[in-house]
Image (spheres, rainbow, N blue to C red):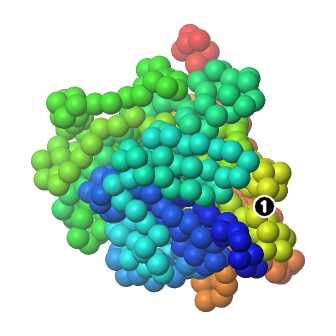
Amino acid sequence: MASTTATETPFRVVIVGAGLAGLVASHCLQRAGIDHVVLEKQTDIAPQLGASIAIYPNGARILHQIGCLRALEESCVPLNRWWSRGPDGKAIMNSSFFAFVKENHGQDVLLLERRQLLQTLYDYLPDKNRLRVGCEVKTIKQDKDGVEVILADGTVEKGDIVLGADGVRSPVRSMMWEHANKTTPGLITAEEKRKSMKTSFRVLLGMGPPASEVGERDLTICSDSGFVLTTVSQPTHLFFCVYQKLEKDLLWPRQLRYTMREMDIFAESVADHPVSDTIVFGELWKKRDRAILVGLEEGVLQHWYHDRIVLVGDSVHKMLPNIGLGGNMALESVAVLCNHLHAMLASQQGKKPDLVALNKAFAAYQEERMPRALHITDFSTKVAEGQAWVTPFHKFYTKWLIPLLKERALADMIAELMRGAPKLAYVDSSGFGKGTVQWDDEKEDKEETAKRSLQWTMSVAALVGIVAIGTTQYGRLRSLLGLR
């Protein structure tokens, strides 16, 4: 990046939040030579909160670029089998899904503890002095020259833009809305706010010691009407999630908060539910190390930025975690935003970008990311509803139709989501694994691309055909039974 003049301070980004998106943003900005600071409200960078996080090849490619992938691979073992089971714990499907994903992309799907991911991202930061902990943001002030971020202790961090990476309940997002309605009344409507995030599921998630009954490195999905029990095993520990569909969706700003007593009651209500054909959930619950019951927000915002504030990660797009794509989407959005910032600054010839230039870069970021975010969010919702047998038809197609597909069909469908993923445009990605599916942003073998597209089209056509037949037969069955 071109240097600034002697009388001008460098372009500076104030990142709010040191979770996955915030720490990765620091990595990306450091590699772009862009000055910044990361403000984190908590004092612990890697707290014992949450449970697991999945890293798919699209996220792994970016982690490879910033030099963290190898360390993460050494902290866990790749997933092996995907088991789908019914309410009795008996197997419906036993798939080599993860092996096919690796064949397609040259990279395993990794499953690790969230705090391990955060700790590794912190440990591998080139310059840790960019990070400030125990910093709660109270106010953001903007003018034509930049931003001032006022902290709870009265100190001020100055910069040119604020990057909101502070999660699904983002204070920065609320501050952006407030500023927008002062400067551009009516831009952010009450209806947009209400529909920005909805909660239709809750989840009991936690971890404990390994259980041989669910394998050593397997994913197990045990479906029932209205909820699904998921376990992911590693040699040294086990992650579990119990998702339950709510009777009625909640819209922003309503949030679900649960007490420990409410968590225990919910766990007791599913204690006798099989996880496999040899173990029930209560046995896992009794040995848990920690757990939490939370509501699950989902949604994609209409406005990703305003003036000098721009949002990334869960603060702007949040998806249900059943398929494990949310963290990877945060990685993608950070990479794309940093690509546009890097390109914009390179075009300024050492001068500070004005608000017009900033908003042009932000608009390009939103335009590039929004369609993919909407698509992946919708896909994640459909997966969650199918796993939880939300309707009789969801049960019908997940129990009877999907197992009829070729074993690699699901991995090939995921490949079409993976291949369009972005990466850092200004950082080398050589050395990352190669699979049979090429990334859209890399030189493609046209013959291979056509072959893969045909395979995917046939898989989708098969699924659509099966679902269409199933829908017809299901409708006839309901008519025969006198159901409406």
* Extreme residue in the right direction: 446
The spot of residue 90 in percent (x, y) is 33, 48
**Observer-nearest of 202 and 352:** 352
Identify which residue is drawn at 45% across, 57% down.
Answer: 39
Residue occupied by mark 1:
353
* Extreme residue in the left direction: 286
Identify which residue is drawn at 35% across, 74% down.
Answer: 76
Left or right: 130 in relation to 464: left
Identify which residue is drawn at 71% across, 71% down.
Answer: 7
The spot of residue 241 in percent (x, y) is 34, 47
Q: Is residue 112 visible?
A: no
Of the 4 image quadrants, the one containing the N terminus is bottom right
**Observer-nearest of 188 and 286:** 188
Residue 59: quarter of image: bottom right
Identify which residue is drawn at 27% across, 43% down.
Answer: 292
Compared with 132, 447 (above or below) is below
Compared with 94, 141 (above or below) is above
Amino acid on which the number 1 mark rests in the picture: Pro
Left or right: 442 in relation to 391: right
Left or right: 119 in relation to 339: left
The spot of residue 305 in percent (x, y) is 69, 45
Q: How many marks?
A: 1
